[in-house]
Image (cartoon, rainbow, N blue to C red):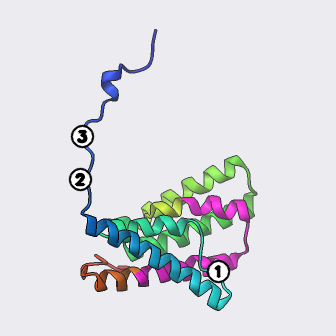
Amino acid sequence: MNAQPPLSQLRPTSALPPLASPRAILLAGLGGAIATLTLVFLAQWSGLAFVMAPFGATCVLAFALPDSPLSQPRSIVGGHLIATTVGLAVGNLLGVSPWTMALAVGLAIALMLITRTTHAPAGADPLLVMLAMPDWWFLLTPVLSGALTLVAVAYAYHRITGRADYPRYWFC
């Protein structure tokens, strides 16, 4: 007996989301580029780490979807801090294996939901830190310094471009 659903059940149930305006597309891309450039320049100027790969995905949310709960400062900063802490703790306490990597991602997701700091890009943080196994200073630089910088750039950028309603809320 064939356990696969018929092809008719695989059809989409709704249409694609509407295409953003050319202005919104340009502004989102420009905002992400400026935020990334700011992180790279701060890293070069200070000699400290400000950049990590998940911050690229954070830029997508902060500049393309600024109204999303996942794009708010509480989620950007809290999500990255929580997920990175989980990755460092699990890696240091239990070692790195496929099972502990899966455990760390699952715990990070659960803790972000419990603390209302869900930020999808932070889901990559436990994997990043478990593969690299940096020291605990990684929480300060690049995680906290970079996340706060991204929030500051997003705040200023949205003000300059006419979006005075970002963020919807800060940390409370």
> Alpha-carbon distance for marks 1 and 2?
37 Å
Q: Classify 106 as above or below 28.
A: above
Measured in 3D between alpha carbons, the distance from the residue under mark 3 to the one under mark 2, in whole angstroms, is 12 Å
Instruction: Tell me the number on the disc at residue 18.
Output: 2
Residue 139 in the image: state x and y as whole percent.
Answer: 62, 77
Q: Position of residue 150 (x, y in %)?
A: 46, 79
Type of residue at label 1?
Answer: Ala
At x 61%, y 61%, the residue is 126
First in sequence: mark 1 vs mark 2: 2
Which residue was labeled with disc 3? 14
Is label 3 in contact with label 1 (beta carbons under 8 Å)? no
Residue positioned most to the top: 1
Which residue bears the numbered disc 1? 49
For mark 2, give the secondary structure.
loop
Q: Earlier in the sequence, mark 3 or mark 1?
A: 3
Residue 13: quadrant of the picture = top left
Choose mark 1 or mark 2, whichever is in front. Answer: 2
Cβ–Cβ below 8 Å for labels 3 and 2? no
Given the current orientation, which residue lies at the most extreme bottom position?
46
Describe residue 31's horizontal placement relative to residue 146 as left or right.
Answer: left
Q: Secondary structure at mark 3?
A: loop
Mark 1 neighbour class, 10 Å CA radius: few under 14, some 14 to 19, many 20 or more:
some
Q: Residue at x 54, y 60 (%)?
A: 108
Q: Quadrant of the C terminus?
A: bottom left
**Is residue 137 or residue 51 the one in the foreground?**
51
Magenta: main secondary structure: helix
Residue depicted at 62% across the width and 81% down the height: 141
Q: Which residues are magenta?
A: 124-153
Res. 80 mark: none
Q: Amino acid at mark 3?
A: Ser
Amino acid type indicated by mark 2: Pro
Task: Where is residue 132? Give x, y as percent.
Answer: 72, 64
